Amino acid sequence: MTNSYSSINISNLSEVESTLTALNDAKKNAAEKGDESRANQIWRDIQALKVVSTYFTTINNIKEQKYRDAWCKLEQCEITCKFLRENSSEEFYKKSGADFVERYVRKWQSLYPYCMFISPGMVVGYYTCSICNHKIRPRSRCKHIKGRIYNGELCTHQAHDIEFKEVSIVTNPVQKFSVIHDDETLDFSVLEYLCSHISSPFDEWEAHWTTKKFPRDRFNSVLKDHKCPCQSGNSFGKCCKDKVEIEIPHVDFELKNGLNKNVEAERFPY
């Protein structure tokens, strides 16, 4: 992966923060002078540096088994990439590294065992434009478009007079950080396995989901009232307990730099 920040040590948080401070000062100066084109470009540089450095921290969090922290940072990357893509040229988006991060955020998210989330239901009294503070009404809107940048600032609609009504449990949330699982009860072995084979957050890899058959005696630790390893949803005793071979979900990783030969080639979860 290549980006516009090869001179910045992404792993050095203090260096990243000092660079972001300098960029924010430059953006403010350009905005005050009315140089909107420059202010907008610096906004792009800021967002690109944020997303690349956040992604770096995210993968290190996964390696440190801080799975929930990493999950929330993946969502931050996802949101930042969305707005950066909408306000950048394709050339800048790819060169900055944001395109790489966007693709790999989705890949990492697909490896997580999270599947249940909280979704709050609410009523919003009214919204205002973050750029001009205009009160948004169906027949009274300002000239600013939500999600676009103006003089170095992203236009958002600010909610006011919020009244929470309900909380629902969903599988496809708007807010991915609202996980309701207890991490202590989940299996993160797929993430652990991948991390044992990559040397850098920017290593390239692919995951191929399939199934694989194993001899029955490999599952002696599974009791008959446990969920069946084949993930049918039935108990082991009513499903695959008496089979000669049991077929379970499996993922093969393909790494551009090859697998780490010092790590076991296959990890069996039972």
Image: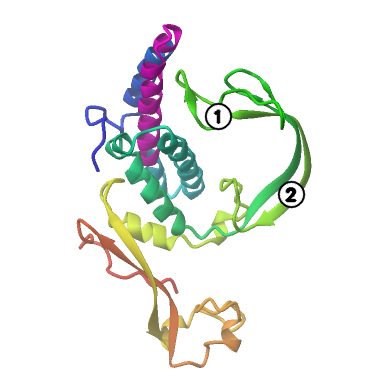
Assess whether residue 31 is covered by the magenta stretch.
yes
**On screen, residue 261 above or below 203:** below
Give the residue at x 40% y 55%: 107
Q: Give the extent of the magenta segment.
A: 29-56
Where residue 77 appears, as percent x and y from the top left, is 44, 40
Q: Nearer the viewer, residue 270 or 256?
A: 256
**On screen, residue 215 above or below 208:** below
Residue 21 visible, this orientation: no
The local secondary structure at tag 1 comes to: loop
Q: Specify the label residue 117 is tagged with.
A: none
**On screen, residue 72 above or below 210:** above
Left or right, 185 with reference to 104: right
**On screen, residue 138 above or below 211:** above
Q: Nearer the viewer, residue 154 or 144?
A: 144
> Which of the 4 image quadrants contains residue 33?
top left
Assess whether residue 58 is covered by the magenta stretch.
no
Q: Specify the label residue 145 is tagged with.
A: 1
Give the residue at x 42% y 34%: 84
Nearer the observer: mark 2 or 1; the answer is: 1
Where residue 269 appears, as percent x and y from the top left, is 43, 71
Residue 39 visible, this orientation: yes
Q: Specify the label residue 167 is tagged with.
A: 2
Tag 1: residue type? Ile
Q: Quadrant of the C terminus?
A: bottom left
> Which of the 4 image quadrants contains residue 14?
top left
